[in-house]
Image (tube, helix red, strand yellow):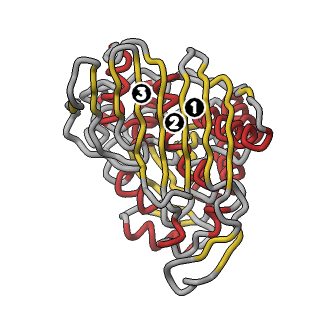
Amino acid sequence: MTGHGPVGVAVVGCGTVSHQYLPTLTTSPDLRVVACADLDLDRAGAVAARYGVPHGTDVPTALHHPDVELVVNLTIPAAHDAVAGAAIAAGRHVYNEKPLSMDRESGGRLLAAAADAGVRVGGAPDTFLTAGTQAALALLVEGAVGTPQTALLLMQSPGPESWHESPEFLYQRGAGPLFDLGPYYLTVLASAFGPASRVAAAGRRAFPHRTVGAGPRAGTSFPVEVPTHVTALVEFVAGQVATLVFSFDSPLPRTGFLEITGTTATLALPDPNGYDGQPRLRRATDDDWVPVPVPGHRSGRGIGVVEMARAIRLDRPHRASGEQALHVLDLMMSIAEAADTGGFVTVKSSFTPAAPLPSGWDPAVATTVVGRSHG
């Protein structure tokens, strides 16, 4: 492993999500994408050629390439453990697309294996690193709302089947609105409040079956296996409480809604599932919301990988940590269990939230390769 210059990256999994990551990864001066790998070698080659990556290859070859230090694991969730485990066994750092793992136990084993191997684990989502959200988190640290007390989180939609050509998987075990979109919202919330301590929840299904509404299979009916509306109460170790609604049952879309209320003001954060947006602040003495200035740079999926690479070079903790991703997974599973049992469920995992990034941090500007850091 080298300790200087751009961090060598292998992207494993060349499906749809790779096209969201690769524009960021291949243009960051802190990274050098060495290989794209997939079970389908033709697809790996096509994706590599499209983004100017030197090698389109199979997974073992990519994991053991001498220039690869960090593996970005974009495989399907069921393959996350196996691919990440193989990367760790090869002595590579790994960054997993969400979820970190399929359950708490395998996620814990993954982090333990990385610790034993002396490598790092990172985990999506990285939307909490956007300029707008980081500006909002900095305001909380600075006391702009007084002492944070509560949060209100709403993610409501009629569900994706009206436009998605193959929506069945979004209504199967491990999905639904909680597990599909929850990571974005809960990662931001955990970044603001720290680890959760216990949860209570209720869930329901509006319809036992749904119908594909687009594409060649339009009109096809399929079963719904999971709650499509989940309401939860989350208590945090530091004492705050949050009310959460995740729903695919609402004819009225209401997404990107996350407000934190303190003793002196309320802060509206940008959409946790987006890479732009501006926070707004409303004090008790204000007649309306006041927009919060944020840096002008734009970012996209993959900024967590960039930040992780910089942290590797600077030998400091990275912010999209495996511990944070595991806690969010534990929190979602605890909410699902609370909805099943009707009682409070203790959240046993923990993590240490990272300090907000400095306002000058820009994922598109080189830092570590020239020996200096903006954080």
Residue linked to disc 1: 324
Residue 112, position as x, y percentages in the image: 72, 31
Q: Earlier in the sequence, mark 3 or mark 1?
A: 3
Q: Which mark is residue 187?
A: 2
Q: What residue is drawn where x is 31% and y is 40%?
A: 363
Residue type at mark 3? Ile
Q: Position of residue 290 (x, y in %)?
A: 21, 29
Q: Is residue 93 visible?
A: yes
Does dot 3 land on a helix, a strand or a loop?
strand
The alpha-carbon separation of the residues under discs 3 and 1 comes to 20 Å
Label 1 vs 2, first from the N-terminus: 2
Q: Nearer the viewer, mark 1 or mark 2?
A: 2
Badge 3 local density, few (<14 within 10 Å), some, or many (20+)?
many
For badge 2, the amino acid type reads Thr
Return the residue at label 3: 260
Looking at the rendered structure, which numbered label has been put on residue 182? none
> How far across and down, in percent of the image, does residue 283 sit?
27, 20
